């Protein structure tokens, strides 16, 4: 894999610190980044300077701290915009509810918001706040907006908060934030030149003009996979079933809400794809007939005959080698994950299968987190904890990109784009 030591050496990173009690953790983060060879500049909001003195950061980075852009002289003002341009990444940690709101609204009131607003560098945001503030609809809307802008959110953790109460809102630990920064650089562009197709969401099999048989899939996992592929440079097509999340920007969206529509779209897209990830929850059965008219209540029992849907991913698995993309399926199993996933991998002709357990105390469906195990023909490849779906997606792409390159006989770091068909 391309991830590893040295990803941060020489990188220009701006750490923006806002006014939360967790500002002290930014000191550790800055130290960790500096130790890995990054050139770190710190910008602080006025409130942040009340929690940690700018001198602490200046001593660690050996660079001036930007803590009040409006008091800078003309030369420094220009330096400050230059910094926004020179930055390879911006890390906002801790990010308060106020900072999230300002960024989402495009408001600039200090050095932190000015740099984040002026820069075109990727932005990692690590929020920290009281649980009530974090779950407040305005905060959640602002986070969703920032995600839409392409900001990477390092989710706050559950723990004891400044109030003494326990809840979600505690700043992620500095090593977790460091990990997000390292991954950003290790991965940048590793899917460049590849066309990735991802199916996501659930299907709805019509019973009559208003009713359908569906499932609870939210499409969050597939959307995160598509978004992560986009950020790593792939051109992405998202074949979207019924989803409760907005598809990421910058990907081509094909709507396909029934299994039949999904089949048509997938079979059309697959021969052009280098990699196909089938994360959609496709109905295994559909009503034999959909009534043209709304079915009326009659007092009697209603029998619905269900017929099996074609197994779409298995059809792709049978495609001839010159058009068959590298193929990843999903398996949601209520028991015996390993055996069932292995059988599906074989029967459907997959390269990899992503398994998760459903029906237990943790319900991945609709959740923002997931715990998965990836299997190949030789067995389990991963042992990951429960993670936010975006982080699951990043790890999946680390693994998929690596296996794809090996399967196509490409050396690490060699040009990846459509090597199979052109060779
Ligand atoms: O057999 P099962 O439905 O558990 O398999 C799940 C995998 O197969 C997923 O990758 C899903 O997208 C795919 N699938 C399919 N066509 C179906 C049902 C599932 O491609 N009709």
Image (cartoon, rainbow, N blue to C red):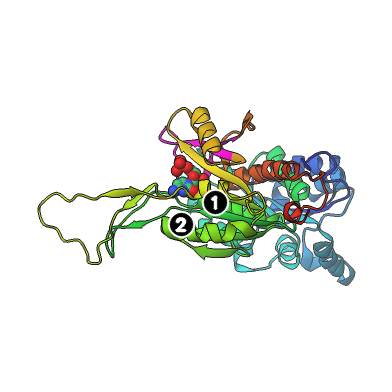
Q: Residue at x 66, y 42 (%)?
A: 395
**Tags 2 and 1 in contact by the CB under 8 Å rule?**
yes
The stretch drawn in magenta includes residue 373: yes
Range shown magenta: 353-375
Query: Element type at marker 1?
Result: helix
* Residue highlighted by disc 2: 243
Q: Nearer the viewer, residue 23 or 393?
A: 393
Answer with left or right where residue 79 lies relative to residue 290: right
Q: Position of residue 92 (x, y in %)?
A: 70, 53
Question: In front: 189, or 96?
Answer: 189
Q: Residue at x 77, y 41 (%)?
A: 3
Tell me the crowding category of disc 1: few under 14, some 14 to 19, or many 20 or more residues within 10 angstroms, Cα based: many
Residue 132 shows up from this direction = no
Q: Is residue 202 visible?
A: yes
Residue 239, position as x, y percentages in the image: 53, 59
Image: 360 above or below 219: above
**Whole-percent x, y for residue 158 in the image:** 54, 38
- Would residue 345 be counted in the magenta stretch? no
Say what secondary structure mark 2 lies in.
loop
Image point 63% across, 33% down: which residue? 382
329 vs 259, left or right, is right
The residue that disc 1 covers is 222
């Amino acid at each position: 894999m391309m991830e590893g030591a040295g990803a941060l050496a020489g990188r220009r990173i701006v750490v923006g610190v806002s006014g939360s009690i967790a500002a002290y953790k930014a000191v550790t983060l800055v130290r960790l980044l500096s130790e890995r060879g990054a050139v770190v500049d710190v910008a602080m909001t006025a409130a942040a300077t009340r929690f940690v003195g700018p001198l602490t950061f200046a001593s660690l980075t050996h660079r001036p701290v930007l803590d009040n852009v409006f008091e800078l002289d003309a030369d420094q003002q220009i330096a400050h915009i230059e910094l926004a341009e020179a930055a390879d990444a911006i890390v906002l940690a801790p990010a308060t509810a106020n900072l999230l709101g300002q960024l989402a609204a495009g408001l600039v009131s200090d050095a932190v918001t000015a740099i984040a607003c002026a820069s075109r560098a990727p932005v990692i945001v690590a929020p920290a706040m009281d649980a009530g503030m974090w779950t407040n609809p305005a905060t959640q809307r602002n986070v969703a907006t920032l995600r839409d802008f392409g900001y990477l959110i390092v989710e706050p953790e559950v723990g004891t908060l400044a109030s003494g109460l326990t809840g979600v809102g505690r700043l992620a630990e500095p090593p977790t934030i460091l990990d997000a920064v390292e991954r950003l650089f290790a991965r940048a562009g590793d899917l460049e030149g590849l066309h990735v197709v991802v199916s996501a969401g659930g299907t709805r099999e019509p019973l009559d003009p208003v009713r359908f048989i569906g499932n609870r899939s939210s499409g969050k996992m597939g959307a995160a996979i598509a978004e992560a592929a986009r950020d790593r440079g792939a051109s992405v097509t998202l074949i979207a079933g019924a989803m409760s999340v907005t598809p990421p920007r910058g990907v081509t969206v094909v709507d396909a809400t029934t299994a039949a529509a999904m089949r048509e779209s997938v079979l059309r897209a697959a021969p052009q794809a280098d990699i196909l990830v089938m994360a959609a929850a496709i109905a295994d059965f559909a009503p034999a007939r959909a009534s043209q008219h709304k079915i009326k209540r009659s007092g009697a029992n209603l029998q619905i005959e269900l017929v099996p849907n074609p197994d779409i991913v298995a059809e792709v698995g049978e495609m001839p080698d010159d058009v068959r993309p590298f193929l990843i399926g999903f398996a949601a199993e209520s028991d015996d994950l390993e055996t069932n996933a292995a059988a599906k991998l074989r029967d459907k002709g997959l390269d990899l299968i992503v398994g998760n357990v459903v029906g237990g105390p943790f319900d991945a469906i609709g959740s923002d987190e997931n715990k998965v195990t990836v299997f190949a023909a030789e067995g389990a490849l991963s042992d990951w904890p429960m993670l936010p779906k975006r982080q699951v997606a990043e790890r999946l792409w680390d693994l998929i990109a690596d296996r794809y390159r090996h399967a196509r006989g490409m050396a690490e770091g060699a040009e990846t784009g459509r090597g199979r068909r052109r060779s």
